């Protein structure tokens, strides 16, 4: 989710120490969730007493995302805006559209909408609201460009496949459709549909590089760590986990398109934002849509930023997974060591 992605990108920007960073949030507090990260050339402003500044942060600004005039004022002297608003919590995309309008009025140069996942025009209802924001960006930039933007899309985070080990600093690691721990995988047919997997820290570093990029941002902003297939990821998992083969639960595209998720096993996508009583039905619904996306090739993203930043070296996926899975005890033998 966007709220998990934001801190990784913030860390990468802070580590570079090249920009003054302002946080826009609905409330100002030390523990406030990050709705936007804003890079600014404005002078450092004294912090409010109620808002201790985290290391690397220039200022917190409390805003109302429905107040265009206030948002415009908050963005004065800002150069780049990165949005992490949760799209499904933004009814009618009101907050992001108002933010875009404020960026234009304030003279912001660059904007990244709250994407951070699948390719454009996804059939997944959990992601379709992003299409409306993209369409709005196209409209405000026609016939003349008024706001440079890019849609950062990394596909599926490879970090998830260390579950139940927490391999990322901020991203909540949840069970996904290929589970190295229990040696199970859900494949659509033979699993040869292409999928893009990217480590969240690779995405964060690319975003930090993109902020300093001297050329024009591409509207399509694919960030591709590893172009492969679900079947190949499952094969790698079997190699790393020892002699036992993965249990494969096969589903058909026809059933998925009919709204049927017939896998005997359903990974539980536990997340703090999902109430416990809704975990199982939500997990089945999310997995249905996710597997439909896999079947339709919607988890493949472009390599626009790979090509623009050829010097950047993405982490080796096999080495990353080997670090976490080689020599681990099989599930059921004893508790897995959690780092």
Image (cartoon, helix red, strand yellow):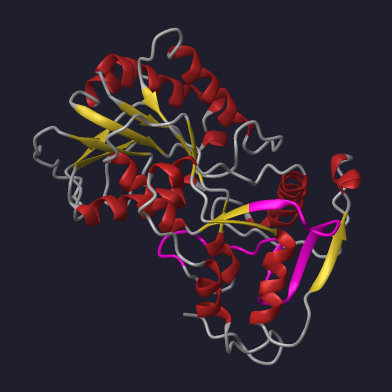
Q: Residue 49 is drawn in which quadrant?
A: top left
Q: How many labels does the image show?
A: 0
Q: In this view, does 157 lie above or below 90?
A: below
Residue closer to the observer: 160 or 216 = 216
- In the picture, measured across the screen, residue 63 lies left or right of residue 120, that is left
Residue 121, image x, y percentages: 64, 31
Q: Which residue is drawn at 59% across and 87% down?
A: 328
Q: In this view, does 150 lie above or below 259?
A: above
Q: Residue at x 18, y 26 (%)?
A: 77
Residue 94, image x, y percentages: 48, 22
Q: Residue 265 is drawn in which quadrant?
A: bottom right
Residue 269, image x, y percentages: 65, 58
191 within the magenta span: yes
Residue 45, image x, y percentages: 10, 37
Span colored in magenta: 168-195
Whether residue 66 is visible, yes or no, is: no
Q: Is the magenta stretch mostly helix, strand or loop?
A: loop
Residue ranking furthest to the bottom: 333
Whether residue 29 is visible, yes or no, is: yes
- In the picture, measured across the screen, residue 86 lies left or right of residue 33, that is right
Q: Which residue is drawn at 19% across and 45% down?
A: 50
Q: In this view, does 206 lie above or below 270?
A: above
């Amino acid at each position: 989710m966007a709220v998990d992605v934001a801190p990784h990108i913030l860390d990468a920007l802070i580590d570079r120490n090249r920009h003054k960073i302002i946080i826009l949030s609905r409330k100002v507090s030390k523990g406030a969730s990050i709705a936007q990260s804003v890079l600014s050339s404005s002078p450092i402003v004294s912090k409010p007493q109620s808002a201790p500044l985290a290391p690397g942060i220039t200022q917190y600004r409390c805003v109302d995302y429905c107040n265009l005039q206030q948002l415009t004022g908050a963005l004065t002297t800002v150069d780049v805006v990165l949005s992490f608003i949760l799209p499904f919590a933004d009814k009618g995309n009101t907050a992001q559209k108002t933010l875009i309008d404020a960026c234009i009025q304030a003279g912001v140069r660059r904007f990244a909408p709250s994407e951070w996942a699948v390719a454009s025009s996804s059939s997944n209802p959990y992601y379709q609201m992003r299409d409306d924001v993209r369409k709005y960006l196209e409209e405000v930039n026609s016939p003349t460009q008024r706001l440079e933007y890019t849609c950062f899309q990394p596909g599926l985070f490879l970090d998830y496949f260390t579950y139940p080990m927490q391999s990322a600093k901020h991203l909540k690691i949840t069970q996904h459709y290929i589970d190295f721990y229990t040696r199970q995988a859900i494949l659509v047919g033979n699993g040869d549909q292409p999928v893009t997997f990217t480590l969240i820290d690779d995405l964060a570093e690319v975003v930090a590089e993109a902020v300093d990029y001297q050329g024009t941002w591409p509207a399509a902003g694919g960030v591709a760590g590893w172009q492969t297939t679900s079947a190949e990821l499952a094969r790698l998992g079997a190699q790393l986990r020892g002699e036992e083969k993965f249990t494969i639960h096969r589903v058909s595209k026809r059933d998925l398109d009919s709204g049927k998720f017939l896998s005997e096993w359903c990974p539980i996508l536990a997340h703090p934002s999902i109430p416990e009583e809704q975990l199982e039905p939500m997990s089945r619904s999310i997995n249905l849509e996710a597997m439909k996306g896999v079947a339709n090739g919607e988890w493949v993203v472009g390599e626009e930023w790979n090509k623009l930043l050829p010097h950047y070296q993405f982490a080796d996926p096999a080495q990353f997974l080997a670090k976490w899975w080689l020599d681990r005890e099989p599930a059921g033998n004893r508790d897995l060591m959690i780092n």
